[in-house]
Image (cartoon, rainbow, N blue to C red):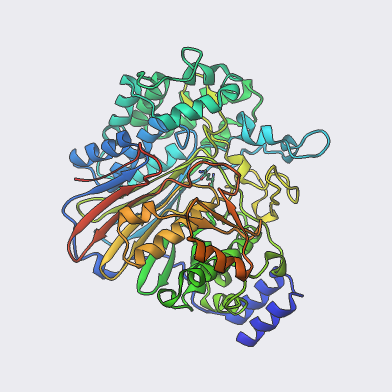
Amino acid sequence: MEENHRRWFSSQALSLPVLALSLLLMLGSAACAADAAPRSAPSSLAQRPGHAAIASANFLATNAGLEVLARGGNAFDAAVAVAAALSVVEPESSGLGGGFMAVLHRAKDGRDVFIDARETAPAAVNSKDYLNPDGSPNRDTALKGPLSAGIPGEPAGLALIAQRYGKLPLRESLAPAIRIARDGFKPDARLRDAIAEEQKNLRRWPASAAKYLPADAPPVAGAIWRDPDQARTLELLAAHGDADFYRGATAKKLIAAVHAAGGNWSMADLASYRAKERAPIIVNYRGYRIITAPPPSSGGVAIAEILNILSGYDLGQLDQAHRVHYIVEAMRRAFRDHNDYLGDPDFVKMPLQMLLSPYYADGLRQSILPDKATPSSMLPAAEAAQPGMHTTHFSIIDADGNMASVTSTVNYTLGSTFVAAGTGVLLNDEMDDFALVPNQPNVYGLLGSVANAPAPGKRMLSSMTPSIVIGPTRTAVIGSPGGSTIITQVLEGILHFIDGQSAQQIVADKRYHHQYLPDVIFVEPDTFDAATTAELGRMGYRFRLGDPWGSNEAWGFMNVVTWNRSSNRLDAASDPRHPSGLGKVQ
Ligand code: DON
């Protein structure tokens, strides 16, 4: 089999689909990393931490989660509380009008489950809506206003978590968010900046302007800001579960507002939305069990592929330049596969058995030269990932050892910037995560693929990679926002955790990223020292300072909790790049 791989990589004559098929035939029943009903290793079940830890992007949200734990809730009730509070205090990143992906670990039976509350395309989705008359991509309909919004998944996902995994009724887990929305809070600099940045768009829709520009201007530092409409929508969610949002009074208001502004949602789109439980992807790497996100996220598949490639190297024995070299080459190969094959598993047949197979990784590893970058142009073509501007991640471990790793998003800053009148709900602009116009480059010069083309009821591909890592003596709950860089941030966090780093070190580490195209290593300032940069330059790498979408914002916003099961110590850390985050142990 190795000989076959080698021949394929040197000839580059076969297409990836041909390789996929032939490998599937060759592999037969080869090891597949995604189990049907995964349970974590017994070593993680024997103990309970006795206290809890939460790290999120906003201290009010962390405190909301801790409050619900203090009322007798578990990590899953706390996750509902944190997500709902973030909808109010960090609306630029996530909210009721968006969606989330979560990995949950239930301590009592070791159940590991993935919650897919990703948005779906409405039945009336039409690729032409995302084209200008001259056939070029229309970035405005893809990113702003109701046409850019998928059917929200967040309310259904929160109701599912509360009902199947929580101990408390939604009335109790949503109480802190309702209180904050009703009584008000002081928006942090990140929210004030996001509103200032998007004010032109917010002014296009009266309900958006009324909510975010109440005095006809962005909120000022120190001023109290209230969100009574969203408080009411949250109260209805608390009283009726998700029935009101998807089939009741809120649903009617959402549809009326979307139609009035030229959107195409129907009551049936809302009524038929379902959050789903899926088997997570499980990767075993150097004695660590990594529980991560399956499609419609591309993150877990990419992480599995990268770690399978890296398992052939002793990274600890390498100098920094060679360590980065092998990691970047693995990233390059995983990202090449990522957009070519992956999409909504309910719509697309994916060669997951191949992509997750150690044998496939063996073949990829053999195409990596020890001292030289592989130009992406030398690897058969695929497409790069779509980046974004905002999203949020939080991590929770409770006193019993239940864990929630949750990444939630409205996609770009303040989503579609469209608030549905009378609901306080800011709609997402997740439709841009589809390849809206197949084979047409988007504003970033990126191509989309058929697997991720929009279709009625289909979920758009995501990079969100909420993960839980269970090692012989230590456990981590980890994730981040950051568009396509989510995947490489989580990967680097996992590698650093396995190297023994603390939660505080992991969130602070400098980051680097390669996504196949463009063929550069994206770096933060001072990610590498001069000697490493020079050595990587000799191997053929080029660098770009900043992230793939050309923004100078800090990369990501990691929120990590760790549990040392030997010393029974919990740590919670929030990314020092953003001062409003809070990691807290109680
Ligand atoms: O699901 C996705 O992959 C994107 N909507 C995430 C966007 C994002 O992370 C923006 N963050 N900085």
Outermost residue, top side: 215
- Position of residue 322 relative to residue 164, above or below, is below
Q: What residue is shown at x 52% (from left), y 79% (from top)?
A: 30
Q: Is residue 310 left or right of residue 74?
A: right
Q: Which residue occupies the foreground of this view, 183 or 553?
A: 553
> Which residue shows up at 54% across the image and 63% down it?
533
Residue 544 falls left or right of residue 181 = right
Percent position (x, y) of residue 65? 28, 40
Nearer the observer, 128 or 440: 440
* Side (left or right) of 130 relative to 156: right
Rendered location of residue 515, percent (x, y):
60, 58
Q: Is there any visible trace of residue 54 in the rendered image?
A: yes
| Residue 197, image x, y percentages | 55, 28
Considering only vertical position in the picture, is 85 above or below 45?
above
The answer to whether any part of residue 349 appears in the image is no
Quarter that holds the C terminus = top left
Query: Splitting the image into 4 quarters, where does residue 220 fall?
Result: top left
**Residue 504 in the image: above or below residue 11:** above
- Image spot of residue 194 (x, y percent): 50, 30
Work out which quarter of the rendered image holds the N terminus and state it: bottom right
Q: Residue shown at 61%/28% (left/top)?
A: 145
Q: Is residue 550 left or right of residue 397?
A: right
Q: Residue furthest right?
A: 134
Residue sitting nearer the eye, 584 or 61: 584
Total numbered labels placed on residues in the image: 0
